[in-house]
Image: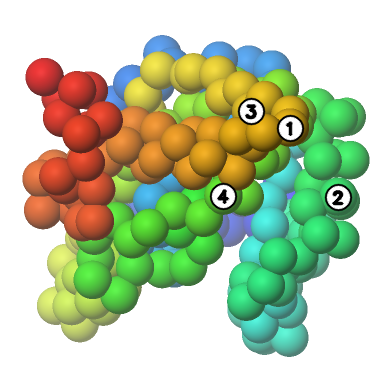
Amino acid sequence: MNYKTLRSIIRFVMKLIADIEVEGRENLPAGNLLAAANHLGRLDTAALFCVVDREDIIMAVAEKYKSHPFFGLIGRAMDVVWLNRFEVDFAALRELLTRMKRGGLMVIAPEGTRSKTEALQPGKMGAAFLAAKSGYPVLPVALTGTEDRLILENLKKFRKSKIKIVAGKPFRVEIPQGVGREEAMHTATDEIMCQIAALLPEKYRGVYAEHPRLKELLG
């Protein structure tokens, strides 16, 4: 199955089961971009496919889905980079950077996995590393309504799910070399996560709800 066919099927299915609202579509410029989004459920990526008309998408997916009959098929159609999420996967990071050098839309969930609390979990430094190394501007993206629990409940009741996608304004991440690099990585990661949190309703902000940077962004 090729990418265009996959996208058409996903859009058809999503139209049947969900109504998707998009806010900030004007913040989706062409060119190289790293879209960093919160990760609520298995339909996060499918929802993004419904609003992004690009074929140069770069994405990393947890290696555990590689042999999955459904998600494995999607991953192969998208030519994703399979990622070991339990350790720093340098081979996967190198492959992602190689693809980013060729240009495209890098899509990443900085949390690394779906949130069990349905609110933001601590972000990992991969997104900040890729943004700084590639020079791609970061586009914060907030999703609500894609929680697996809600999707399943609505399917059982033959009711459409209400999904909302909010795209913020792109910003740059710079990480200096040498002394202070690790601290700068942590700061950049917090910046990315707080930018996402600022686009989310309060109950979704999770561990960043009281972060000073988030309060600055909201104030």
Q: Can residue 82 be seen in this snapshot?
A: yes
89 is higher (above) or lower (below) than 54: below
Q: Earlier in the sequence, mark 3 or mark 4?
A: 4
Please tell me which residue is depicted at 29% across the width and 56% down the height of the picture: 120
Please tell me which residue is depicted at 47% across the width and 68% down the height of the picture: 113
The mark lying in front, picked from 1 and 3, is 1
State the quadrant of the N terminus.
bottom right
Q: Which residue is mark 2?
A: 94
Q: Earlier in the sequence, mark 2 or mark 3?
A: 2
Image disc number at residue 178: 1
Residue 138 screen position, x and y as percent:
54, 27
Q: Earlier in the sequence, mark 4 or mark 1?
A: 4
Task: Compute the Cα span from label 2 to label 3.
Answer: 17 Å
Image disc number at residue 175: 3
Tag 1: amino acid:
Gly
The mark lying in front, picked from 2 and 4, is 4
Query: Could you tell whether 165 is left or right of 186 in the image?
Result: left
The 10 Å Cα crowd at callout 1, few under 14, some 14 to 19, many 20 or more, is few
Query: Could you tell whether 28 is left or right of 89 in the image?
Result: left
Please tell me which residue is depicted at 86% across the width and 51% down the height of the picture: 95
Query: Please, what secondary structure does the residue beneath circle 3 have?
Result: loop
The 10 Å Cα crowd at callout 4, few under 14, some 14 to 19, many 20 or more, is many
Q: Earlier in the sequence, mark 2 or mark 4?
A: 2
Tag 3: amino acid:
Ile
The mark lying in front, picked from 3 and 4, is 3
In the displayed orientation, state which residue is furthest to the front: 179
State the quadrant of the C terminus.
top left
Q: Which residue is mark 4?
A: 125
Q: Nearer the viewer, residue 89 or 175?
A: 175
Quarter of the image for residue 132 reads top right
